[in-house]
Image (cartoon, rainbow, N blue to C red):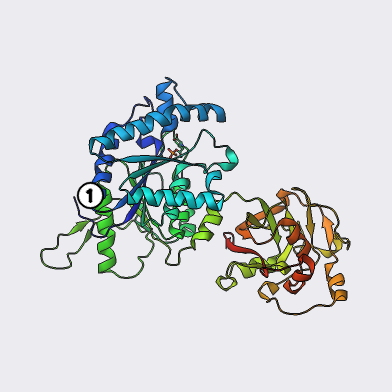
Amino acid sequence: MARVRHPCTIVIKLGTSSIVHEKTHQPLLSTLSALVETVVHLRQQGHKVVLVSSGAIGVGLKRMNLASRPKSLSGKQALAAIGQGRLIALWDNLFGQLEQPIAQVLLTRGDISDRTRYLNAVNTFKELLSMGVVPIVNENDTVSVSEIKFGDNDTLSAVTSSMIHADYLFLLTDVDGLYTSNPRKDPFAKQIEVVTSIAAIRSQVSTTTLGSSLGTGGMETKLIAAEIATGAGVTTIITSSKNPESIFGIIEYHASSMKSTPGTPSESLSGRTSPTIEPSGPGTPTLTRPPHTVFTASTLPMRDLKSWTTHTLFPAGSVIIDSGAHNVLSRRESGGRLLAVGVHGVIGAFASGQAVRIVIRRQPEGSATDYPAARMPAVVETRPVTPTLVAVSSISSSVASLEPLSRSVSSASLAETKSSSVEEVNETDVVEVGRGLANYNSAQIQKVKGLNSSYMPQLLGYADSEYVVENITIRVPP
Ligand SMILES: N[C@@H](CCC(=O)OP(=O)(O)O)C(=O)O
């Protein structure tokens, strides 16, 4: 077994197909035992390890002698409730053989969409890891409903690794990496060794579900997870769950390759095999590259809060921006901050501090502009906003979103500028381009939409910040 030199924080995710047999639903004891030994050895080398374990529903199926996953949400929730206890008991039994304490952590997106609860979860992880415990995470399926679900444990593992600032996320599955096509059907399928741009690679690889009928993930969710984790600075690896001990070799291989070839490795779609790293000195053993795909971590990871906003929070409403603001926000120098002048309206009711979607309106067919003025009567908006009704300002901001709060304004110009119009906009009329944290509530943003920030103190009675939304991450560029 290779020795990993620097202590790391490592998240290892194991999917259902690696935990229970697809047909019999019996636990795959040899895989589980090998993983337990690997985790304990990693711990002995000074690493901190978190396990994200699926399998509650699979274990529940076995307990109830059912052949397949129920279709209904409540059926799945009930089976997860039945299976989770047995699953954690199984892990506790296996880890207990090697004197390794574990902890059960069940999370939902709803649990950590509140900043305080999120920080509590982070603190619990920190405390457990400093106590030498291996936290075992799963989604709290029993209380998860569609809108508060992470949806799959690939995403949950990525969010977990971003929360604890992990060095590595290992997605262990039933294939040993990402391939150019389905390796079970295509003998010419090539493994992709290194991915530096997930967006670029998405269209070129096989994302068909290669796993069993039990899990909810597949390669697509692994790409999404890799995008979240690498964006937060976590090196992400897809490899086979059959030999968990290869984790040592993979970490060692990357540590050595960084030493021998400084700089970021380039994306490889060439199917190149780079099985060895030359010894760096006499007596240094040659390293073999264990099969895997590595997604390199972003060199400019998202700030913690941004990552939290983008992936963890369930947005309470939407802020509609114009194309100028969309352009500006897509540039790094915008700092992810939105001025009122770039806002066209809001959808829903939200409080200051809540997460909001940043949306743009879909281009009406045959129109050259975002918001054709002719369609908007100039009236002062008086109606309260409902989730499906949005007040849309007739003022276009262009790139003025970077304009600072400075100028004093006359009442006349304020009255003139405040003239706005009301138009019904459905959720289907808009498309989400990013997320952020609101600095003002929906009614306040409604009041100042389309205006220069210098109007804010007058209209709101105060202006703590000139920006109406901050910590914005744009995920769909213009
Ligand atoms: N929380 C569910 C697992 C959901 C899930 O993501 O499964 P998988 O695609 O096998 O990782 C369970 O424990 O059965």
Where residue 353 sits in the image (x, y, percent)? 63, 57
The residue type indicated by label 1 comes to Gln
Residue 7: quarter of image:
bottom left
Let me know if residue 150 appears in the view.
Answer: yes
In the visual, does 348 lie left or right of 229?
right
**Residue occupying the far left of the picture:** 283
Q: Report the residue marked by disc 1.
A: 44
Q: Tell which of 441 and 192 is nearer to you.
A: 441
Count the marks. Answer: 1
For the C terminus, which image quadrant? bottom right
Where residue 216 sits in the image (x, y, percent)? 47, 38
Name the residue: 83% across, 71% down: 417
Query: Looking at the image, is 458 positioned above or below residue 168?
Result: below
Q: Tell which of 429 and 34 is nearer to you.
A: 34
Let me know if residue 180 appears in the view.
Answer: no
In the visual, does 410 lie left or right of 282?
right
Q: Tell which of 56 and 465 is nearer to you.
A: 465
Where residue 365 sits in the image (x, y, percent)? 75, 56
Where residue 470 sits in the image (x, y, percent)? 61, 64
- Looking at the rendered structure, the secondary structure element under dot 1 is helix
Query: Looking at the image, is 341 positioned above or below residue 297?
Result: below
Residue 342: quarter of image:
bottom right
Query: Looking at the image, is 279 positioned above or below residue 289?
Result: below
Residue 379: quarter of image:
bottom right
Quick check: which quadrant has ligand 1? top left
**Residue occupying the far bottom of the picture:** 407
